[in-house]
Amino acid sequence: MTDRFADLRQVASTLGVDAVALVPGPNFTRAMGQSFMSHERPFLVVIPVDGPPAAIVPNLELQSWSQIGFDGEVFDWRDQDGYSAAFTALARHFPLQSLAVEGQVMRVFVHHALTSALPGLRVIDGEAAISGLRTIKTADDIARLQTAIDLSERALARTLDQVRIGQTEKHIETLLVQALFAEGAEDLSFGPIVAAGDGSARPHAHARADYAVASGDALLFDFGGRAGGFAADITRTVFIGHASDRGQAVYETVLQANLAGQAIAAPGVTAHQIDDAVTGVLERSPFADRIRHKTGHGLGRDVHEAPQIMRGNHTAMQPGMVFTDEPGLYKIGDFGVRIEDDLLITETGCRSLTSFPRDLTIVGR
């Protein structure tokens, strides 16, 4: 019988700890085959190097938990009683000396509950090793991700057809969100960025209810829908009515940088080399002072995961890795342009999972 936790047990062994602990999030969902909420109630699974796992489960989640076929001890607790007894029971069941946790996901109060129940417990941050299990995507992972990307691109096409001069950023954002769910998104990958004019110069802008798009504005969309637990992450920048000469020049520079990333990405090429090629195009342009960020990041169950596509990261690309290629140029008080594609490393090079047109586009005439 296949051990669903074999790779996590290997992580624990490699890290030299007794067990790995997961809390609700992408790694938890991958391991358990179902997502659960992360809220004020502690919820975790402990997977030892050898033997059955154990879990602390809020009582109100027990019915859902029973559906996943968990073969291990379960210590549940009720709101009116508190969770301390469940952690004490876990400590008796697993007198652990050391534990690897997800440093970017486990919350402090859960950590404190563990160390209170297990005085002297050595806790290490196993985030890189645990999340690293998701770095190489399976064929099923890629199929789910492609579904998320395809529906997201259809939603963008729907939205652009409806954009008109005088609409607010917030109104356009609403059109986009409605289109994502109409196309079959299970959820949003993240709160979408819809920013026009000077707002497009802020890489993580929020849509404004009091800014109406005007002729000549750059209009930036950074968004994605989820499908099968995987997140699309796409950015396109269009222009309203017309694009100025400077707007066209900035756009063409960003496009060439984006294409440089696609041209160099292949097995064995490092994240450093990809970023160097992409950012190098921007640095050699007349707009080098508008550079604000690295080239991209890994993509999968999380919107941002390993590998980070940046100078100094010498991780070599391997077939099955997926990352974003998203160069951008921004000038505060003026405008910004970003073009983002989701790239899959193949056996011979890379393939863009995104296919939405990259040519400069004018909308809202």
Image: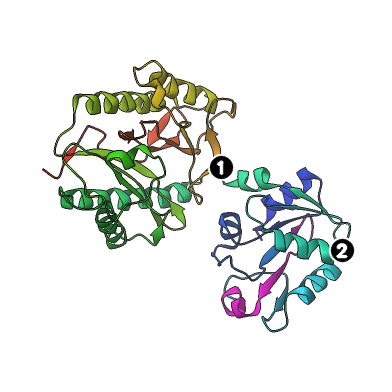
Image height of 209 relative to 91, above or below = above
Which residue is the site of mark 2?
A: 95
- Residue 345, image x, y percentages: 46, 34
Quarter of the picture containing the N terminus is bottom right
- Residue 218, image x, y percentages: 25, 38
- Residue 265, image x, y percentages: 45, 27
Instruction: Identify the element where label 2 is drawn.
Output: loop
Residue 263 shows which numbered tag? Answer: none
Which residue is the site of mark 1?
A: 135
Residue at position x 14%, y 39% from top?
Answer: 241
Question: Can residue 221 be seen by looking at this rendering?
Answer: yes
Q: Is residue 53 magenta?
A: yes
- Residue 15, image x, y percentages: 77, 44
Using residue 306 as the reference point, say whether residue 249 is left or right of it: left
**Mark 1 nearby-residue class (10 Å; few <14, some 14–19, many ≥20):** some
- Kind of residue at disc 1: Thr
Report the number of discs: 2
Residue ranking furthest to the right: 120
- Kind of residue at disc 2: Pro
Question: Can residue 268 be seen by looking at this rendering?
Answer: no
Image height of 87 relative to 356, above or below = below
Residue at position x 17%, y 53% from top?
Answer: 162
Image height of 239 relative to 1, above or below = above
Q: Is residue 333 magenta?
A: no
Residue at position x 22%, y 38% from top?
Answer: 217
Nearer to me, 92 or 52: 92
Instruction: Identify the element where label 1 is drawn.
Output: loop
Tell me the magenta residue range.
46-65
